Amino acid sequence: MTTNVAPKDGMPRGVNRWMSPQEVCDELRIPKQTFYQWRARHVAPPAYRFGKLLRIDRAEFEEWLTNHAEHFSSS
């Protein structure tokens, strides 16, 4: 049974806090192998292990994206 309760951290309803590596790859449109190569090089978004599951916090993923954006100058 799923409840439709608004999360406390301000995320919109329907947005899960925890993302799987596959969800990250789907969102970035990258192969799963690339994600795991980034993890080996310590450049991937922070991840947490819950038993056998690896999960990425959506807020930290969004922050990671912002920090890795290229900024172009108009000059």
Image (cartoon, helix red, strand yellow):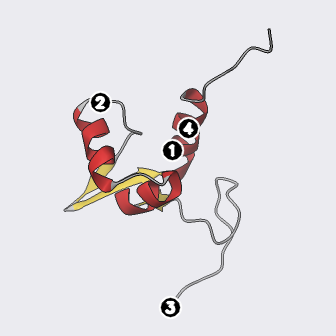
Name the outermost residue toward the right. Answer: 74
Q: Are marks 4 and 3 in contact (CB under 8 Å)?
A: no
- Label 1 residue SS: helix
Residue type pointed to by label 2: His
Q: Are marks 1 and 4 in contact (CB under 8 Å)?
A: yes
Pointer 1: residues within 10 angstroms few (<14), some, or many (20+)? Answer: some
| Residue 50 x/y as whole percent | 27, 58
State the CA–CA distance, disc 2 to disc 4. 15 Å
Disc number at residue 42? Answer: 2
Which residue is identified by label 3? 1
> Would residue 14 appear left or right of 43 to someone viewing this image?
right
Residue type pointed to by label 4: Leu
Instruction: Indicate the quadrant where residue 62 lies.
Output: top right
Disc number at residue 61? Answer: 1
Question: What residue appears at the point 25 percent right and 40 percent down from the top-left corner?
Answer: 37
Q: Looking at the image, tell me whether mark 1 or mark 3 is earlier in sequence order.
A: 3
- Label 3 residue SS: loop
Q: Looking at the image, tell me whether mark 4 or mark 3 is earlier in sequence order.
A: 3
Pointer 3: residues within 10 angstroms few (<14), some, or many (20+)? Answer: few
| Residue 1 x/y as whole percent | 50, 91
Label 1 vs label 3, nearer the camera: 1
Residue type pointed to by label 1: Phe
